[in-house]
Image (cartoon, helix red, strand yellow):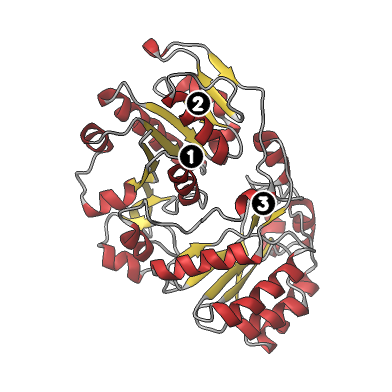
């Protein structure tokens, strides 16, 4: 079945520094891998980013796209909750012109609210709950044979497509892909994404895109100067920070597990090479389940020095990096395009201990900052406000 994989950002929002702006511009990192997996399985796919299309043509409409093409299924990413309204509107517009299409959604927010989405978005046919690669492939196989998605794991679906009023079925089967499944799955395969060049060039930090500025002005506002490729080294979490929608508690509820999964160094290096070929130079990482992280990353950095020396790295630390990690980072990457990011979140140790799964003291934070300075490593530090249990005096302490 020819399938469209569609990323719809939060297309309209407002914030004084940006004015009218678009957010959630990065696609989920599994979207390109899903496209490659479906193509290998005989289901040709195309990846479309609605935000890029709007930048290139403000009059672009998803309804025009699906009206003019022979897609038989459309999958929409709903990873971040900010997208929910725009995804629901996209479903409505697609359904109005192509009542024959099979429409499904996936992502962590979709997984968490799968049944509710089917109850409140009548044009939606199915929601993948949890890991998506094999479930989507099996779902398309069943539909191509003229059957239903009954028995497809990780799936909630509408039993009757006629009249959009069928009962909702949540299949009881669940599937976790074994670690070896991810070894030959390319997370940086842009071959099914016609606008890949524009996507690579356009989105970095800050991630918002102002509709009141030109594309060139938006790129000039990227304070770190480069776009980042989100590198998939592994998944899962063993902790539950109160403010994180991807914590262990959420993953148990949405995905039925909270395992820690690491890919092989070879698979990750293959993706780095693909990302470099696509035009990226800085890899971005936010997977740091200590204490396993140090040994795994020290080996990765060693191999990157030999095999991909042109790559830089932006690494977001969940805990504090230890001296061995810092030395390996400094030996491999250099300013101005490589950073370590620390997130103490609150300046109050009381608030931090109550909310952050990886607690450390202010003294440990300052000693780590001194260590990074000693090794010439650039550092970002992130704080927030409004944590559970945080009072005005504790906020002022930050």
Q: Mark 1 or 3 closer to N-term? A: 1
Residue 319 lies, in percent from the top left, at: 73, 64
Q: Report helix, strand or loop for mark 2.
A: helix
Q: Is residue 311 left or right of residue 382?
A: left
Q: Is residue 369 visible?
A: no
Residue 136 lies, in percent from the top left, at: 51, 35
Badge 1 vs badge 3, beta-carbon distance below 8 Å: no
The answer to whether 166 is drawn above or below residue 364 in the figure is above
Residue tagged 1: 78
Residue located 51% across and 44% down the image? 80
Residue 145 lies, in percent from the top left, at: 44, 23
Residue located 45% across and 36% down the image? 84
Mark pair 3, 2: CA separation: 32 Å
CA neighbours of label 3 inside 10 A, class few (<14), some (14 to 19), many (20+): few
Q: Is residue 25 visible?
A: yes
Q: Report helix, strand or loop for mark 3.
A: helix
- Between disc 3 and disc 2, the foreground one is 3
Residue 13 lies, in percent from the top left, at: 38, 46
Mark pair 1, 3: CA separation: 26 Å
Residue tagged 2: 117
The answer to whether 284 is drawn above or below residue 247 in the figure is below
CA neighbours of label 1 inside 10 A, class few (<14), some (14 to 19), many (20+): many
Residue tagged 3: 180
Q: Is residue 326 left or right of residue 149?
A: right
Badge 2 vs badge 1, beta-carbon distance below 8 Å: yes
Q: Quadrant of residue 348?
A: bottom right
Q: Report helix, strand or loop for mark 1.
A: loop
Residue located 56% across and 34% down the image? 135
Residue located 37% across and 51% down the image? 192
């Amino acid at each position: 079945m020819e399938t469209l994989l569609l990323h719809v950002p939060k297309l309209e929002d407002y914030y004084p520094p940006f004015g009218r702006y678009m957010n959630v511009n990065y696609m989920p990192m599994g979207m390109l891998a899903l496209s490659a997996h479906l193509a290998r399985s005989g289901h040709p796919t195309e990846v479309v980013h609605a935000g890029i299309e709007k930048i290139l043509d403000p009059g672009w409409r998803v309804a025009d796209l699906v009206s003019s093409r022979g897609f038989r299924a459309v999958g929409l990413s709903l990873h971040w909750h900010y997208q929910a309204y725009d995804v629901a509107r996209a479903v409505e517009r697609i359904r109005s012109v192509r009542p024959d299409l099979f429409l499904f959604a996936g992502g962590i927010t979709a997984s968490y609210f799968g049944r509710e989405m089917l109850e409140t978005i009548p044009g939606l046919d199915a929601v993948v709950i949890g890991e998506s690669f094999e479930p989507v492939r099996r779902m398309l196989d069943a539909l191509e044979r003229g059957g239903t998605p009954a028995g497809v794991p990780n799936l909630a679906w509408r039993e009757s497509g006629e009249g959009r009023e069928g009962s909702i079925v949540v299949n009881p089967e669940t599937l976790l892909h074994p670690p070896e499944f991810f070894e030959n799955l390319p997370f940086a395969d842009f071959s099914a994404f016609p606008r890949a060049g524009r996507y690579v060039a356009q989105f970095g930090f800050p991630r918002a895109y102002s509709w009141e500025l030109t594309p060139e002005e938006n790129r000039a506002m990227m304070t770190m100067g480069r776009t980042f490729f989100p590198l998939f080294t592994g998944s899962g979490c063993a902790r539950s920070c109160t403010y994180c929608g991807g914590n262990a508690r959420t993953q148990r509820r949405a995905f039925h597990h909270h395992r820690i999964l690491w890919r092989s160094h070879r698979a990750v290096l293959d993706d780095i090479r693909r990302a470099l070929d696509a035009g990226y130079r800085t890899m971005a990482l936010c997977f740091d389940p200590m204490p396993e992280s140090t040994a795994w990353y020290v080996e990765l950095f060693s191999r990157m020095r030999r095999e991909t020396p042109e790559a830089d790295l932006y690494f977001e630390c969940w805990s504090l990096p230890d001296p061995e990690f810092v030395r390996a980072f400094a030996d491999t990457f250099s300013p101005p395009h490589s950073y370590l990011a620390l997130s103490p979140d609150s300046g109050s140790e009381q608030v931090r201990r109550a909310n952050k799964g990886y607690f450390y003291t202010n003294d440990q934070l300052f000693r780590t900052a001194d260590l990074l300075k000693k090794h010439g490593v650039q550092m970002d530090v992130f704080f927030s406000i409004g944590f559970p249990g945080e009072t005005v005096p504790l906020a002022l302490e930050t």
